[in-house]
Image: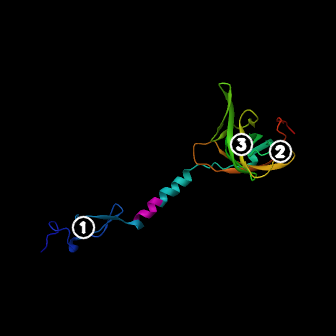
Amino acid sequence: MVSCARHPELEQCAAPGLIGGVKRSFDRNSPSPYPLEPDMDNLRYPVFAAFAAAMVLMPSFTFAAESVKVANAWVRAPVAGQKTAAAYLELTTDRNLALVAAGSPAAGRVELHSMSMDGGVMRMRALPRIDLPAGQTVRLAPGGTHLMLFDLKQPLKPGDKVALTLSLQPSAPAPTSLTTVTVEAEIRPAGAAAHSH
């Protein structure tokens, strides 16, 4: 009679079954008599259950485009041959949001920028986002925060209009939804200043 205690690698000593959701299988060619392989059928439900629970607990941060008011949107007309232009506008929201990106069919790309004085020199730098506190009007204006249009695809003449698409999301530390708002910005002469309609 074969002793399974001394020869567990023998096929007749294999004890089929599940231990802790893992199937035990024996391979006579394996250096160890107890290689383990996962039982996917037995593990699938706990993984799905954990995922479903996470989805239930995840808060919702959706919002409607109507939560955002855009006013006085305009673009400064560039000089002839110039491939960049600055855009300005005013944003008011009823909740804490952030402007995280922008685009326009009139430009190859649009970036969020800030302008400030540094040692008597005006410096411009790209921003990853512009925070929009609830109930406050944030003004993107000459000499400060603005949108920069690069690689203009067409001449921008005073009196014309171009579309600006703004991408916003809630100012929350969790994964959030992204909502876009499209507005038409008036092209104004290079020497124009912001004014309300």
Q: Quadrant of residue 30?
A: bottom left
Estimate the spatial distance between the alpha carbons at disc 3 and disc 2, rounded to whole Å.
14 Å
Estimate the spatial distance between the alpha carbons at disc 1 and disc 3, rounded to whole Å.
64 Å
Q: Earlier in the sequence, mark 3 or mark 2?
A: 3
Q: For the residue marked with disc 2, what is the amino acid?
A: Ile
- Region in magenta: 42-47
Residue 83: x, y in percent?
74, 46
Labelled pair 1, 2 in contact (Cβ < 8 Å): no
Near-viewer residue (58 or 181): 181
Name the residue carrying label 2.
Answer: 187
Name the residue carrying label 1.
Answer: 30
Q: Secondary structure at mark 3?
A: strand
Q: Secondary structure at mark 2?
A: strand
Q: Is residue 96 left or right of residue 30?
A: right
Q: Which mark lies nearer to you, 1 or 2?
A: 2
Name the residue carrying label 3.
Answer: 148
Q: Quadrant of residue 70?
A: top right
Near-viewer residue (114 or 189): 189
Labelled pair 1, 3 in contact (Cβ < 8 Å): no
Q: For the residue marked with disc 1, what is the amino acid?
A: Ser
Residue 17: x, y in percent?
31, 68
Which residue is located at x 84 percent, y 41 percent?
A: 188
Which residue is located at x 82 percent, y 38 percent?
A: 190
Q: Secondary structure at mark 1?
A: loop
Give the position of the N terminus as an image quadrant.
bottom left
